[in-house]
Every structure is written in structure tokens, then in C-alpha cells.
Amino acid sequence: MTYFIDRRPNAKHKSAVNRQRFLDRYRTHIKRSVEEAVNRRSITDMERGEKVSIPTRDISEPVFQHGTGGRRTIIAPGNKEFVEGDRLRRPGGSGGGGAGEGSASDQGEGMDEFAFTLSREEFLDFVFDGLELPHLERKALVDLDEVRPVRAGLSKEGVPARINIVRSMREAHARRIAMRAPIRRALREAREALEVEENKDPVLRNPARIDELRAEIERLERRLEAVPFIDTFDLRYNNLVNQPQPSSKAVMFCIMDVSGSMTQAHKDIGKRFFLLLYLFLERSYEKVELVFVRHHTAAKEVDEEEFFYSRETGGTIVSSALTLVDEIIADRYPPGQWNLYVAQASDGDNWDDDSVTCRDLLIRKLMPRLQYFTYVEITPHAHQALWEEYESVAAEFPARFAMRQIVEAGDIYPVFRELFKRRIAG
Amino acid sequence: MTRRKPIATGSDWNFEVLAEFEREIARLADEYRLDTYPNQIEVITTEQMMDAYASVGMPVGYHHWSFGKQFLAVEQAYRRGQMGLAYELVINSDPCIAYLMEENSLMMQVLVMAHACYGHNSFFKGNYLFRTWTDAGSIVDYLVFARKYIAECEERHGVRAVEQLLDACHALQNYGVDRYKRPSPISAAEEARRQKEREEYLQAQVNTLWRTIPGRPSPEALGGGHDEEDPLGLHEGGRYPPEPQENLLYFIEKNAPLLAPWQREVVRIVRKLAQYFYPQRQTQVMNEGWATFWHYTLMNRLYEEGLVDEGLILEFLQSHTAVVNQPDFDSPWYSGINPYALGFAIFSDLRRLCEAPMEEDRHWFPDIAGSDWRETLEFAMKNFKDESFIQQFLSPRVIRDLKLFMVVDDDQEEMLEVSAIHDERGYRRIREALATQYALSVREPNIQVHSADIRGDRSLTLRHIQDSRRPLARSVYPVIRHLHQLWGFPVHLESLEGEEVVRRYRWPLPEEAERA
């Protein structure tokens, strides 16, 4: 007696819970790997999972086992030249012969590393672990220039392509019932009258009345047939209205100071910050473009690799970067169609007279067009002129301008969270 | 014999074709008088197979991170292509559940049906170990119960607490089995026994309570003072437990002073499952050998009758050869003796020496040489485990074919010694040594509960009886730490060589104990 059961439609991922348990248990190990991965990867390259390795000894499940030593007897297959009484060197000793290493195998020493792959979601969970990703409401995204047609019930006018057949037929049906009802009633009455008349005694019959009734019945039947099956009056069309839509496109400008005072550690911190902002924007918009602008005394648009890893020296003029951003916006990203975000990372150095220029540039030109401007200053030291000028910008645009100081990598998440928390409140 | 038309050709399969093959295999199996549980054949996807694999073949399992780890390992190996996925997976239950993987070819499906649904299945039903130790009819129900119970515990006491407890139990699960004593049958009397156990448990609690209060010294002890160490006679009444206990988890479940009732039940669940898998660990060679022998026999019969075509049988032979391949000890692919190869060789040779015995066979196996092969194989399958099976049936012919040889590795000698090879003088010794190699009692260190100091500091003492001076591996510390967690009081482990204690382990470690 045998049954075949097709289990394929059954739930997969029976082990999902166990997998999660495992990930939770080795959270610290995995976080370490993930952090390394974040540092290593390009910031647009967060779409895949990550391979994670954990030292085998950390996750072993211990049981009582025999150790090495003592006297052991091993039976092994494939004897070639040995005869009884042969004496062999221990394998691994002087590398002699390699004979008899059957001994090594039943004491299975596994690989040193237990490696597995995190899925993308799991990976991002670990990236954002401990970080409340701020939930930016869509209505907070200000520009409503884009529209999208959405369904909005039915209308009596429209183009043939949008006819709603079911609703049209239903209307036709209702109309037919409504229009036929009085005719039918009259018809029924006429027939009954005719029957009464015909059943009368022949002497009492009124032939003229009968003819009249017959003619009436015929007329009514014609009228009944004349009720159209479907009429233009019945037609219903799916109605579409244009709904204003938050723009689904965003562009994120990353501005970083690459002057000599910015070390690689500074840049890494900046990179983390940009990464977070990028991932965050990506969750809110269908399309996110990145523009990298680096500057020392002059600003330049570069690709990501160069942005993060090339070394420059020299002084710092921040306004050069802001000017360039302004030009790029005017050139390629009309504010009506794009949500514009600017993230700036710097160690706070700026050529003194330039800070005022920056403030004016921001207040007059950039801020009115931007969705949000974040400035992070990566420095353990006291603030300089740039910070003070920016503070006045923040006072002018409290909802859209945010600035924070970051001292070390650990500050990034809290700072990031704080920045976007404030945004929700405002 | 008239050759019939092949049931199907090519490598695609569908349910009708599978059912037809299954009927034919069933007919042939019946001809060979294979007695099986009803089959429940489940077709599953690759991912489901990995799930099943990760939960060590339990159709329903409780949640634990180690299964997740297993799953990740299987998945990773599979993705990398290091491992062909489970050739077959079969569960010792009634009905016997076997999995067929969706993406296997027709040949593989037929092969797995012959191997699992008739080979393993009849082994589960026939072998004495499975008959005594497992109850195929109730295992799935028990697994469902276990999963539910542990889930409830997690809700009530937190995932972390349950996980730690399971970690500790898993470390000891190989010692959760009665090795030398037969278990009482799990049966319909289950419920009644449960009830009784609960009573016993309550009673034990009371007893333990009383035992912890030092008894009033007896007048003789006071007057006589015959024990210098124990003038008040606090330790009189002998050691507890009076006999060494091999089943550590059972001892914990019944005696650990501080465990809560739900914790005892969890210990019991792990113990029961260990018990369920115990026969499988002891009959690997036989079980796989038996199944392989039957898939080989049945597939060949199908071919003889023309039910499968040349293409399929060639594909089968290639796969079969790979399964029973035994790399030589010096091959880079060598990883111990392949149980499929050894078991298949022994069963095949058993059939040969029944059907066409030679002089040597009559000398070595006077009882069975020339007997009815089907009965002899049935007898061998039913009444042995790996250890005794090899001891009984490993023939000189198989030793020669596999070119088995014996090496003695003694850490007191500078060199290894080849002490026997496949010749007249060596057969018996090789056979004996190989049998010993498969004895669980030799594969796993022999550790038993020696005493629990119920009147003193409540410490637990275990004894490890060394086998051929082999010491314990370093994993002993994490394991006794787990044991300490269950017992709640200090744990000592003495390693004995003969009568002499050669090594002591303890947890907590002395310095930590002082600090505490």
C-alpha cells in the first residue's frame, strides 16, 4: 500500500525560524562581518546579501569525544604493499610515505570557518540593526509637480478603450427592465381583456372591441421589441483622474571635503553616513541618482571610486562645491521633477572668508530648491567659522536644514536617527 | 522470461509513471518476501529537501539554532555544488515516509523508491534494534508533541532559557540512551506510565528534600565511631546511585535537584529522541548495505523484465557504482570506510556464498554456505547490529576484495605497525577489529554517573573508563559545563585507566569556585 503525496505546494522555509535563531545567536559575529562589508562595498552595492564566516570553534556543539593518544586500531581499505609486521612512520611526522593516514580521518576535524550567506534583507537588517529608520511620510516630500492617473470610479463619458463592459451591461439590463415594465403591464391587461371578451357568449361579443384589443396587443408587442438591448445611454467608462504625485525621482548630492586634513578614517565615516542616507532615500523613491562632488580649493564632480579613495591636498573652499551643485541642478535636475537632497561631510575646515559666502549661497540659491540638506562635521575639535554660519542657515530653514557633529564611527547611527526624527516632528 | 515494454523512457517523470514503477517494484519486493510498512512517498522541492535534511530527517522538529546552522551549512554546500543533495531521505515511521526530490531524473526516482521504500523500510520493520527501541507508529505524534511542548515552554519561560537548556541536553544526548538495558516498550500504556512517573517525581522531590537534612546519627555510629572520616555516619547507606548509571540524561531528569518540572520534561524529550535515533547510529553499515543490496537487486530485475530500458539501467549503474565506491586509504577522497560499500559487499557476498559456495566458504560459514540465500539474508538483517553483523558475516572474500588491513597506532611506540592484512593469518583479526571499530561503546568514550554526593556538597561525579588509554578530547570542558548547568552543583569527571584515576576534570574550575 503506497501513497504519493505532492508536497511541493507546501510551505517552504520550514527552517526559517531555526535560521533566524542561528543569526540571533551569532549576532555579534555577523555584525562584525557586516560592518566590514559596509566598509568594503560601494554604497550603491547594497543589493546583495553577504557571505559571513564564523570560526568553527565558536559555534561547535561539544560532545564527549576521544582525544588523540592511547592505543588505537584502525582498519583501512586498499592495502597495496604492506605485509604483516611492517612498521610505518606516523603520517605528518617527516612526511614519509603518507602511509596509514587512515588514522587521521575518523577524528574529523572540520573546516576552520563556518561560512554562509546572508540574504539581502538579513544583510540590511544587520546594517540598520539598532537604528530606527525614520519613516518619512510621503506628504512631507513637498513638490507635487508630477501627476499620475489613478482609477476614480465610473463616468458616463469616455473613450471606447475604457468602456467598463460589466457595468455597461448592468446598466442596459436595468434600463430594459425599467422601460419594458409599463409596456408589459399594458400588454398583460390587454390580453386579459381580450380573453374575457373572447370567452363571452357569442351573442354578447363585441367584434369591434376584439379587433381593437388585437391591434393594441400587436402595437404593444412591437413596442416591447423596440426597446434596445444596449443604448449609448447605458455605457459606462472607467474614470481616470490625474492625481498629483510626489516625485518618484530623487537625486542625492554627496559633497565631501578632500583637503589634506581629511584622513581616510574621516572619509570612511562620511561614507557610512552617505550610505545610510542613500539606503533611506532608496526606500522612499523609485529612482535615486547619486552625484559625487568633492572639493578642496576647487570642486569637481567625480565617480564614486575617486570620491572615496583618491587623495588630495590643499586648502578648503566649501563654496566651490556649493556653486558646482547649484550649476548641476540648473543643468540636469530641474527641481520640479527631482527631489533634491544634499549631504555634506567635512572636518569643518574652511577658508575663513568663504564661510559667509557659503551661507549666502545656501540661503539665497540652494535651500529654496532643496528637499533637505544635511551637514555632518567629523571632528573632535571645536567648531570653526563654517559651523557658525551654517547655524544661521539652520535657523532660517529649521525643517529642511540639519547639521550634526560626529566624532567617531559609533556616532553615525544616532546622529542619523536624530536628523530624521526631527524631520518628522517638523 | 518475456520482456515487456519499458514503462517509460527518458529522464522525465510524472505521477502516473512513478505509481506504475512503484507497483512493479512492490510486486518484485513481494516476490522476495520483503516485509514493509506502508509507504508514504512525498515529492518535494530542493529547498524542502534542505529543510528536511537540516532537521536530521525529523518531519516535524522543535526549533533550535543548531538546526539553523545545519541548514545554512547544507545550503552553502549545495549552492557551491560541493554536495549532491540527499540522495534519499527516509523516516522510520509507520507509514514509512520517503522523500523524492522534484528535480531528480526518472532513474533517480525509481532508484530511491527501491532503495528507501523497500530497502530501508523493510530494515526498519525487521531489525531487532528498531523493533525494540523505536515505535514507528507513534514517532510522528511524539515529534508533534515535542515541538508543541517546547514552543509552549519558549512562550512561558523565554526562548533564551529554553535554548540554553537544549544546548546542554544536546551536548549529552549521546548519553541519553540506555545502552545495555532494553527500554520498556513505548505503547498505549504510555499515558498511565506518564502518570506514574509524575507521582514518582513528586515522591522523589520529597525524598530529596528529606535527604538533604542530615539524619539523626544512629546510636551505633555515635558509640562505635568505626569511620574516622565520618564519625557521625552522615555518609552511611552507601554511595548514590548504588550502581553506576550509563544514561546521564535519565539520571539528570530524575535526580537533578534544582530543575523545574518543565525542564525535566525537555530533558526527557531530548532523551526520547536520542533513543529514537540510537538504532540508526548502530546499524549504519547494515541499513545502508541492505537498502543498497535491494535497490541493486530490484533494479536489475526491472531491467531483466524489460520494464526499464538500457539508457536507464546504464544511468543507474553509473550512479550505483558511485555510491558503493570505496576509495583506497591513500586516495585524496578517502574519508573512512564507506558504509554503503562495506554493507553492500557483505550482503552481496552472503548471497553468493549461499548460491555458489566455495570450499573456503564451507570452512568459514558451515551453517549458511549453500543455504537458502533469502532466508539467510533475512536472518542477518533481523538479528544483528553493525558490530555483531561484521563479526558474524564479514567473509575472507570481502576482506580480500577491499584489501583491508589493520594498523595499530600506539602513542607509546615510535612507529605504527601493520598488524594484519588480508591473508589467512589476518582474516579473523581484521574482522574482529573492524567489528570493534563499529561498536558504539568503543567509538564513544564510556562515561557513567559514579556518584552524587547527596549528603555533602551535592556534587556529581562521573567516571570515564578509558578504552586502550585513549584520553578525552578537549571538548570535555564545554560538555561538563553544560552538565553543571543541568545539575546545578559542582561536577567532577574522573578518567580511569584500569582502577587508577589518571586525570580529573571539574566544573566550575577551582579558581572560579573560590571566587564564588
Image: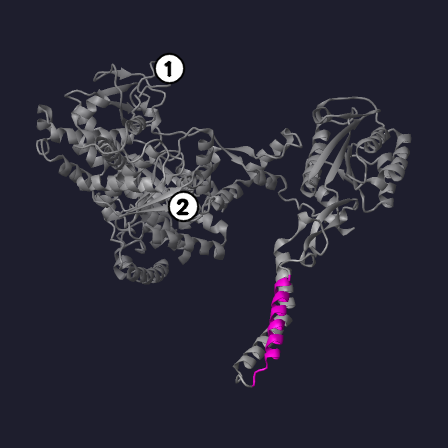
User: Which residue position holds label 1?
Assistant: A95
A139 lies left or right of B63: right
Q: Which amino acid does label 2 sit on?
A: Arg
Whether residue B216 is visible to the viewer of this picture, yes or no, is no
Q: Which of the 4 image quadrants contains residue A145? A: top right
A376 lies left or right of A276: right
Q: Choose between A97 and B84: the one closer to the eye.
A: B84
Label 2 residue SS: loop
Residue A400 in percent (x, y) is at 81, 44
| Segment tinted magenta in the rendering | A204-227
Instruction: Verify whether residue A216 appears in magenta.
Output: yes
Q: Main secondary structure of the magenta part?
A: helix
Q: Choose between A144 and B425: the one closer to the eye.
A: A144
B340 lies left or right of B62: left
Label 1 residue SS: loop
**Whether residue B422 is situated above or below residue A149 in the rendered picture:** above
Tag 2 and tag 1 share a subunit: yes
Q: Cα distance, mark 2 to mark 1?
A: 53 Å
Residue at 33% across / 29% down in the picture? A106
User: Which residue position holds label 2?
Assistant: A7
Residue B37 in percent (x, y) is at 25, 47
Q: Choose between A328 and A271: the one closer to the eye.
A: A328
